[in-house]
Each structure stands twice: as C-alpha cells, then as structure tokens.
Image: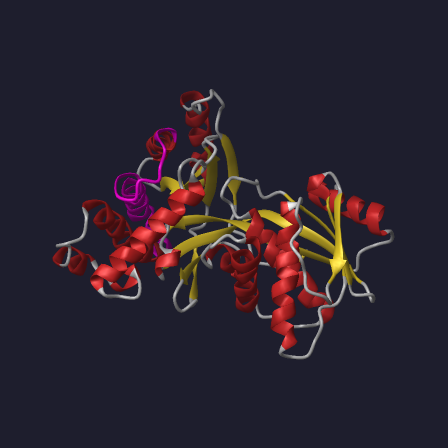
Amino acid sequence: MTTPPLHHRVADAFTQVHGGEPTLWVRAPGRVNLIGEHTDYNAGFVLPCAIDRQTLVAARPRSDGQLRVVAADMAGALDAFSTQAPVPHHASAPWANYVRGVVAVLQAELAARGVAVQGADLAIAGDVPQGAGLSSSASLEVAVLHTLSTLQGLGLARPAMALLAQRAENSFVGCQCGIMDQMISACGEPGHALLIDCRSLETRAVPLPSGMAVVIVHSRVQRGLVDSAYNERRRQCEAAAAHYGVPALRDVNLAQLQAGAAGLDATTYRRARHIVTENQRTLDAAEALAKGDLRRLGVLMAASHDSMRDDFEITHPAVDRLVAIAQSAIGPEGGARMTGGGFGGCIVALLPQARVPALQARIAAEYRAPGGEPATVWVCEAAGGVGAA
C-alpha cells in the first residue's frame, strides 16, 4: 500500500521542523452544500455533506506552553506563539490566524474551568481546494480544535467544536460566516448529507442513495465582490425580517410573504422570496433524498439555482451556462445548481455514478470559462466528520 501524498507531505514537514514522530493524527473534511444557500444567517435550513477532501494534522504535545505549527502547503512556513498568553494576530500570514483564532477562543472557553491551553507541535496540510468555496478554512479550524482537545483530554463534543470554530472565524479572523461549514466538518457522517437547523443547531443525517455521486465543478470564475455583496444581501434580509416583524426570514412562509409585501421595495422582496422558498426547498430536498427520489431532487435543485439567479442575483453567466450543461447531461435522475456564496466559484451535481463519465465529457466539450480555461471537476463521496486519521 502506497503512502497517501497528503499524509506523506505532513509527515515530512513534521519531521523536518519538529524532529521525531507525531503522536496523533487528525483529519477534518471540507464540505459542499447540496441545497440551502444564504439561509444559514437567516436562521434557516441547509443540507451540506462532508467530502473526501480534508485537512490533515500531525501533532505532539509540548510542556512549555508553546504552539509551533508548520504549514506544508505554504512552503513550510512556520508560526510559533504562546498558548498561555493573549494571542495576537499574525500581521503577514493569513493562514496562521485560523490557528491562532482557534487557540484564542479555546483559551476563553477553558478560562471558566481554570485550565490553560497546552502547547503542541503541529504540521498541517490539506487537499480541500482553496478558494473554491469548499470550506478549507472551516476544515482547518475544526481539525486544529479536535487536535488540541484530544492532546489535552478536553473531551469537546463535536457541536461544541463547531461553535468554537465559528467563533474563531467570526471574532478573530473577521469573517461573519454562519454555522454550516464548521458544523458539517465536525459532525458529518459517511454516506450522508446533514440537514442542519441553523437556529436550534439540531441536525439530521440524510442518507444518499446507493450509487449516487457528488460531483463538484469549479467554473474557474474567481469569485469577485463577495464580501460587499454578501454584506448587502445580509442587510436586505434583515430589513425584510424587520418589515415582517419577525426575528429572521425563517419565520415567514410564502403566503405571509405575499400578503405582507406592501411597502417593501421590489429588490428586498425578491431577496426575501429567495430565502423563504429556499428554506422550503431544503426541507423538501432532504425528504426527496431520504426517499431516493432523484427526479424530485433534480427539480428542487433547478428551482434553487433559478432563485439564486433571479431573486437573490448571486450567480454569474458562466456559472449559469455550466449548470445548464450539467442539467442537460444528467437528465431527470439527479440535478445541478450553483453552490456557495456566489458570483463565480462552483456548482454541485448529484447523479448516479454510471452517468459521471457522460457529465465529464459534456463539460469538457462544451464549457470554457470567460478566460478560456476548462472547468475543474472533482468526483467526491460523502465523508465523515472530524476524527483520528
């Protein structure tokens, strides 16, 4: 059996920088959202699955309160700091702030117990594509949290790790993400999607039908204006919720939306309509998936994409074209839609494994990004959440 390249990279980095061998290996997956876009910060529902691309951490405890971490994917860049003093931001290495943020929130969590965060030697690498909207950052955060929890015997539960990882990203890194990415990386189950209620944080594992492939296709359109557009959409959703007198758009159904539309400007109404209908589509898609009803699932995925294009206005013409090619190649037994924040990035397709070659051939023949690049295709399986590697 050959050594997996990712494992080999991490092992080499650990030995070169720290010397000796690690005592612990941890992996945490990336994710793709099957349906439920921009619903998380509206206290709604999402249906992601973890994928068999991951962040891998090799670790060994230290007794001096120092955390020394080498990033094999960053040309062996090294970061070192004390875990027992306030953790400052790293001014020039953005990757390091995800690790530092995890330590900072863990310090605050353990302070109530009168416990300090112990030091460790870490080596990290991953094969979650970066910049593709597949949550490489959440994968890194959850992997580091599980590593530190295991080394120190903290016994952190998976949902607790997800919340701490989200807090690290919100308060330390500065990205106001919802809970979906960290929750699925922590709590995913092999062969299943996870229906997440983003208000209660209740989860329900939904089995993927046997023989179903999860295919992620990068349009090669780099996502632009994401932060400003994301913040604008969030403000519009909050304004709509205030108009309807509810805490979040999760609390509005379609009949209420239509009945109370007077006085709401047309753009904000369309934004709200996407959220309200997307929440229902997500619940319906979980039911269809559990029943193995790929035809119904395909209809819901197509409606989701149309809503993102027309009501939420977050797709891109090249992504729309890529979705149309995929839907045509898949036919009625499955579906495709844009996934992620929007304005470029990836689509996700669900289809029988036997149809994957035909889908790949159609995309190769018919799609080019605006700059002439072919799409990048990843054929994935639904993986389990964070754990020992």
The magenta stretch spans residue 304? yes
Using the rendered view, name the quadrant where residue 63 is placed.
bottom right
Magenta stretch secondary structure, dominant: helix
Residue drawn 65% across the image and 79% down it: 113
Asked if residue 10 can be seen in this view, the reply is: yes
Q: Which residue occupies the foreground of this view, 349 or 345?
A: 345
Q: Is residue 369 above or below residue 107?
A: above
Find residue 239 and report its horizontal and vertical position in percent: 27, 56
Q: Which residue occupies the foreground of this view, 132 or 240?
A: 240
Residue drawn 47% across the image and 39% down it: 216
Q: Give the range drawn in magenta.
A: 289-318
Figure label count: 0
Find residue 211 and report its horizontal and vertical position in percent: 46, 46
Q: In this view, does 135 lie above or below 170?
A: above
Query: Looking at the rendering, in which quadrant would you find the N terminus?
Result: top right
Find residue 323 and report its horizontal and vertical position in percent: 36, 34
The magenta stretch spans residue 306? yes
Query: Looking at the rendering, in which quadrant would you find the C terminus?
Result: bottom right
